[in-house]
Amino acid sequence: MTTSPLVLGPMVRHVDATSASIWVETESSAQVSVRASGREWAAKTFAVHGHHYALVELDGLEPGTVTAYAVDVHGTQVWPDPSSGFPQSMIATLTPGKPLRMAYGSCRTSVPHDASGNRTHGVDSLRAYALRMASDGHLPWPDLVAFLGDQVYADSTSKQMQEFIRARRDIDAPPGEELKDYEEYAHLYYLAWSDPANRWLLSTLPSAMIFDDHDIRDDWNTSLSWKKELETTSWWHDRIVAGLASYWVYQHLGNLSPQERAQDAIWRRITGHTGDDEIDVGAELDAFAEQADRDPKSYRWSYCRDFGDTRLIVVDSRAARDLTPDDRALVDDAELAWLDGRMRGGLRHLLVATSLPFLLPMGLHYVESWNEAVSEGAWGKHAARAGEKLRRAVDLEHWAAFQNSFRQVAAMANEVADGKRGPAPETITFLSGDVHFSYVAEVERTSGSRILQAVCSPIRNPLPRLMRSFAAIMSYGLATPVGALVARSAKVPDPPFRWSGIKGPWFDNNLAYLEVAPEGLNLWWQTGVVDDGDHLHPGLERVASLTVAPRGGANSTRPA
């Protein structure tokens, strides 16, 4: 991969007013130090299947400060690289009470950023943003970027990933071009995060993450029959263990605050190790991942953060599912209770980030609710088998396809919006990705909070043009009345409220931005564009924008 002592990173992960977490992968066992403002913090690496990682926790920082930092491995500076051409990496601590500004999006493939890669996958919106931020020091930085699923594609691999697979095993044997084990996941993350521009961005901009299906496999946990079918293969056990173990290392660990990490059993083992040698937690992490898959209630991947008067709840809508037919749920009862405890008023804005859109276009919502009923036997066994095939073929497995969970969370949102869980916020906004088109929808209400769905998908993996037409037809137009008719034919009750689109859809590669402002909630989407054939240095262009004003004010949604 690299001859540098630093394989990946540094990545700025969880940051609050007085602390920051810096994650790195190193070439070998090492002592990793971070230097900033005349101080130094250090951590020993831990090993997982021959790979070496450190997460350095910086404490005692000053609130509201922006501080340059450097990373040392074995006492030698390895970051920043003066020859890179990018600005100094920074740690920006939060200012108490400052309104939140964040970026978000999902679905990003890792292919080269040349003309060929841009022709097949479009311009990487994240990289275009990185280049813009690196060249314009006057643009305000977000407080974080939230990656809402499909950070890596374990089941649809690039040519570069397939070359790596061929060099170590027979690619014609199962699982073929898909990932098999931890070593392959490690290389997949390397491909995803090693581009110099994106690497610089992630060394300065704090990030929060949650998985979706392609981080593991398409349609992950869509149904009990899907799960049973995969469990009969010779390779699924190793795949799910490697997928969850690598997710814990590369994505989840940095999501947690120092206090939350201190409650994690594996992290306690790492930080409690006092010997001079490097601790190897590979076997423990595999056992943990196996248990987390077998018993989703044994570990929670969801997390919650407050930014002044705005709360961000990040919900696991994949691993926490209950697929038992009689108790089928997108989030099991333990996860639902955790979410219920955090769906509260008394805030200005409540943001619920879930990789899968909570509010699909209504036509698609009806179709998915009908398909769930048919697949679970509403029209008999023969229809159920056909329904299951359709469910997998066109990915009918969002919140709408788990009606019990949808209705329970809708009830929570309504109670918050009606002021029954504390003073009603201005907005309750579901942030999502997954569907490879972006849009904004709003629940039809005349009082209380405004309830919205704001989708940003993809960052870099656009739908083929033929599929765009199919998605539009399935989601809008005749799909709504026809979908409602077929849903009622399967005795699916109408949703507890109605909603409609107020912006979109659009199909560009995008990165979305959200800003809490005096006039309301500002949202905008930007895409990378190639000027004068310079594919390696794309520009950034705004695709859509709007301001969601509070209902008590200008009660409107207007251009930002």
Image: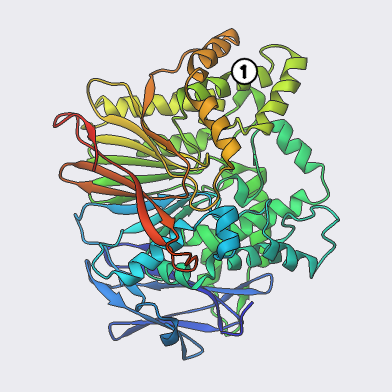
Q: Which residue, as the protein is rendered here, is positioned at the far bottom?
A: 76
Q: Quadrant of the N terminus?
A: bottom right
Q: Position of residue 222 (x, y in %)?
A: 64, 35
Q: Which residue is drawn at 54% across and 70% down?
A: 194
Which sits in the foreground, 537 or 371? 537
Q: Where is residue 526 in the image (x, y as percent from the top left)?
A: 37, 51
Drawn side of residue 247 relative to residue 62, left or right: right
Number of callouts: 1
Q: Which residue is drawn at 65% across and 43% down?
A: 218
Write down the quadrant of residue 34 in the picture: bottom left
Q: Which residue, as the protein is rendered here, is positioned at the far front?
A: 532
Q: Residue at x 45, y 32 (%)?
A: 358
Looking at the picture, does residue 354 appear above or below residue 537?
above
Which sits in the foreground, 27 or 466? 466
Drawn side of residue 277 relative to residue 197, left or right: right
Looking at the picture, does residue 451 appear above or below residue 236?
above
Q: What element carries label 1?
A: helix
Q: Is residue 26 visible?
A: yes
Q: How is the image coloured?
A: rainbow
Drawn side of residue 522 relative to residue 204, left or right: left
Q: Position of residue 367 (x, y in %)?
A: 56, 21
Q: Which residue is drawn at 55% across and 32% down?
A: 469
Q: Position of residue 242 (x, y in %)?
A: 68, 58
Label 1 crowd bin: few (<14), some (14–19), many (20+), radius 10 Å: many
Check disc 1 and report the residue beneath it. Answer: 373
Q: Is residue 13 visible?
A: no
> Three-letter amino acid code at disc 1?
Ala
Write down the quadrant of residue 451 in the picture: top left
Q: Quadrant of the C terminus?
A: top left
Which sits in the foreground, 45 or 454? 454
